[in-house]
Image (cartoon, rainbow, N blue to C red):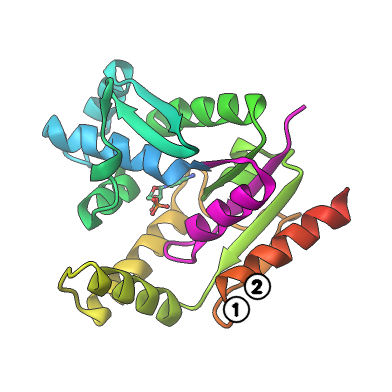
Amino acid sequence: MSINIAIDGPAGAGKSTIAKLVAKKLGFVYVDTGAMYRAMGIYFMKKGISPDDEASIGKACGDVDISIVYEDGVQQVFLNRENVTGLLRTEDAGKMASAVSGYLSVREKLVELQQKLAASENVVMDGRDIGTVVLPKADLKVYLTASVETRAKRRFLELTEKGIPCNIKEIEKDIEERDYRDMHRENSPLRRAEDAVYLDSSDMDINQVAEEILEKLKSKE
Ligand code: C5P
């Protein structure tokens, strides 16, 4: 049986950085589920389908193939056999992902893929519904959050480092809107699973959070 760690939380809480580090320390595979929703979002954008058009999105879900391959331990996302990994981290892809991730047709397709991956490998998987829906029997569940101000500041620094012009107030507003949508949607809203460990990373550095997660896993053994 594979070992599964689920990490959920709002946008910009540091889930992917932490999940990657924990996976590396344990020799597990890191599965970024947000990237799959982003790839779906890109597909609908390419086809010119509006995020409000649920019927067309449902139909398009039947034609799209999302697959995951690991190259040197790094997740690569293929959209209809094209590697789109480099296109996923833009603000537009994030917004489109958030706008379409409420539809059952989109979720069902991706949850199946995520469950298959977790059944065959030891994984650290991050997202919004991993502990509640995708892996309800995960060996360890973590709900990782941080204040909106901290999350906006981290995002601002990340974009500024890349030379991308941005405004911290706008980032804060985007984060709040995305959280609201993700927490209030009908299907698989973001919420802490009852048995998830709650971690607020506002005043913790990456290594402290990773150590805390590894300790919790140890105490479960
Ligand atoms: O984590 P990331 O910012 O890449 O996720 C993009 C969007 O995909 C989220 O805002 C959320 O709407 C959606 N998502 C989801 N369920 C997941 C992972 C991501 O609904 N398990």
Total marks drawn? 2
- Write the residue at 32% across / 76% down: 157
- Write the residue at 39% across / 28% down: 105
**Mark on residue 35?**
none
Q: Please state which amino acid type lies under the numbered disc 1.
A: Met
Q: CB under 8 Å between callouts 2 and 1?
A: yes
Front-most of residues 126 and 212 = 212
Question: Residue 18: percent from the left, percent from the top?
Answer: 56, 60
- Asked if the magenta segment contains residue 29, the reply would be yes
Other-residue count near label 1 (Cα within 10 Å), few / some / many at <14 / 14–19 / ≥20:
few
Examine the rendering and report whether any part of residue 101 can be seen. no
Relative to 77, is 168 on the left or the right?
left
- Write the residue at 57% across / 56% down: 21
Q: CA distance from mark 2 to mark 1?
A: 6 Å
Up-down relation of residue 187 to residue 16 (above or below): above
Helix, strand or loop at disc 2? helix
- The magenta region covers 1-30
- Write the residue at 43% across / 55% down: 182
Give the quarter of the image for residue 208: bottom right
Relative to 115, is 159 on the left or the right?
left
Helix, strand or loop at disc 1? loop
- Asked if the magenta segment contains residue 24, the reply would be yes
Question: Residue 51: percent from the left, percent from the top?
Answer: 22, 41
Up-down relation of residue 102 to residue 10 (above or below): above
Locate the N terminus and report the quarter of the image it occupies.
top right
Residue position for label 2: 208
Question: Residue 61: percent from the left, percent from the top?
Answer: 31, 23
Give the quarter of the image for residue 167: bottom left
Q: Please state which amino acid type lies under the numbered disc 2.
A: Gln
Residue position for label 1: 204
